[in-house]
Image (cartoon, grey):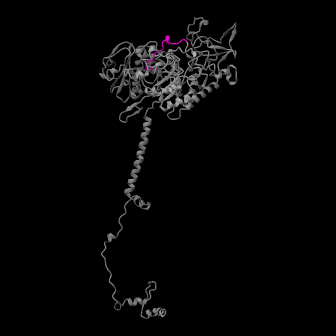
Amino acid sequence: MVEEEAKSLPMELSEKGGVENNGFVQNEAFDGKETDTSSQEEMPKTCIVDVDPAAMEEPPLKPYAGMPKEVLLKFSSQARYRVTREILFWLIIAATLVLVGATIAIIALSPKCLDWWQASPIYQIYPRSFKDSNMDGNGDLKGIQEKLDHITYLNIKTIWITSFYKSPLKDLGYGAEDFYDIDPIFGSMSDFENMLAAIHDRGLKVIMDLIPNHTSDKHQWFQLSRNRTGKYTDYYIWQDCVQAAGSVTPPNNWVSVFGNSSWQLDDVRKQCYFHQFGKEQPDLNFRSLAVQQEIHDIIKFWLGKGIDGFSFSAVKYLLEATHLRDEPPVNKSQDPETITAYSQLYHDYTTTQVGMHDIIRSFRQTMNQFSSEPGRYRFMGSDSDEKEDIEAAMMYYGTTFIQEADFPFNFNLINMKNLSGNSVFEAVNLWMKNMPAGKWANWAVGSPNAARISSRIGKEYVNVINMLLLTLPGTPITYYGEEIGMENTASENVSEEPINSDPLAIFPEKSPMQWDGKVNAGFTEGNSTWLPVNSDYQSVNVEIQMTWSNSTLNLYRELTLLRNSELPINRGWMCYIWNDSNVFVYVRELDGLDTVFMMILNFGQESTIDLQAIVPSLPSEAVVRLSTNFSNTGKAVNTKLIKTEMGEGLVLEYRTANPVHTMEAFEGKCFVAEKACYSSAFNVLYVNC
């Protein structure tokens, strides 16, 4: 019944005039009825709301953190952002260019920095006499390692250790039996490596000796050469000798440095070999390329171990003339048969031969292979040993285009025949006026082969000599013990039977280092020493002088501090002011700095000097920056009347706008190696003054 009603419902709606909504499409019937409003029921009225059109608009979009790319691009194209961005971009470019340009300018205008071998004094150690670590009475490499704090206490950063190769020790170890090994008296290769690591850990450098001219007759090369074995046959200089009636007639009149003929008959080879020094030290044949290569290999071996440089000794003896002519006698009237001393001949054919410098320069080239790493430049020094020929000594610097030694060692201050203000000036001036432009000077006042300062010129001059050494331009070289004023061991203290029966143990300048006032001066805890300790060790030692304000040790330390901290003394001009029989006066100054240091050093008797009369622009007063008498330090002195006692030294400090090196009156009396000028505005050094 319900289903039938449902089926009839559409028909009923149609009959009543209903309109079917067929997808909301209007039909004609509906349109016609819709116009007849009278027949429709009243439609509901629409509710009208008053809305502000501006409120209906979306709010303006502003930049916000984390906006997506689409939003970002809407803003980046706007003028205010684009212009700002371009301005910042070009400002950054301009700033970068300015920074790069300034960097290039600073590099171009900056002077060369002083290298490590220029910036610090060098402390020379004779290892057998420095510190014994195993109580056998001989100094060793472990002993050096134990005492590295002393080196740093002195404000020194470079150590020079003399020869410690395996050797019979017939010539202080300079005749090596094996260039690749350590003599057992000094320790082992492991000891060396540990010492080297400890040195480098403290920021120090180490230089070794190398004597390429000769070997020991115990060396394997010599044993092979005397037996004519392969390439070693010509490793040494062999010549036939005339043998008659039990005597040997050498090939010529050449004499050894130690005296008598420099030729020695070898019973095995039945020939004479040549030796410039002792007969136990045969000379190598450097005209053999194989020998030269052997030395290059030795250099590479030790540089590979990590050492920082070499001192090449006895290099002027590397080559001899092949013609073997007799050398001319000094006294032409002397009977040739009586010539036995080295000083009786002119050594025209056995020293400084053509090609010798080429060999040394080849050593430099090998060392340069190890100098490319930043901060690892390898130093090369050479022992010129040219006492009478300063021009020959200067040849070891090399040329403008070919590098040789960084400097030949300068022993002018050791070789002075007498001490006075004039003699010191002459020794200094001889080196400075002959040194090639741009090269670096060096100075030594002691060595293993010269009497100590106290014994050579008097203990009253030790302090003033150290003041000279540490205020001259260049690298100062101090032989161990000179910083405390050690003296030679008196001859009566030297035992007739030295330990190990070393015939050279009588050398008094090699006595053990005096560390304290205990038995054997703290050099060893053993019962004996290879050389006697000087009897003054209880008052002349490191420990006690550290406690004395006016000690030689403390003055030395103050001088090294001054040298390291003051640019004029470190790398500035030196100008001679005055010299006479008593005093030597000079200044150290730097362009751009108004601070000047003047050294007044007395090497004679009591003296009074009027410095204003010599330098009219000198201020009327100067301050004593350092004095050999510490009680004077800090005092003001009248430059018109400066008095010094015998052996007294003063470092005066004053300010001036008129430096001496710019004065016409001192032209030719001023020297500078690494020229630099100081800019107070930027606190930098530059070269174009």
- Does 482 appear in magenta? yes
Magenta-tinted stretch: 479-496
Q: Relative to 28, is 263 above or below?
A: above
Image point (63%, 16%), residue name: 274
Q: Judge whether 606 appears above or below 677 on screen.
A: above
Residue placed most toward the observer, 161 or 235 = 161
* Nearest to the observer: residue 159 or residue 110: 159
**Number of numbered discs overlaid on the protein picture:** 0
Q: Nearer the viewer, residue 190 or 177?
A: 190
Instruction: Point out the image quarter for the C terminus.
Output: top left
Is residue 294 something one can see in this rendering? yes
Viewed as shown, does residue 382 lie left or right of 460? right
Residue for point 70% across, 8% down: 244
Residue 475 x %, y %: 46, 24
Q: Residue at x 58, y 11 (%)?
A: 259
Q: Nearer the viewer, residue 452 or 596?
A: 452
Give percent across and percent down for residue 121: 45, 25
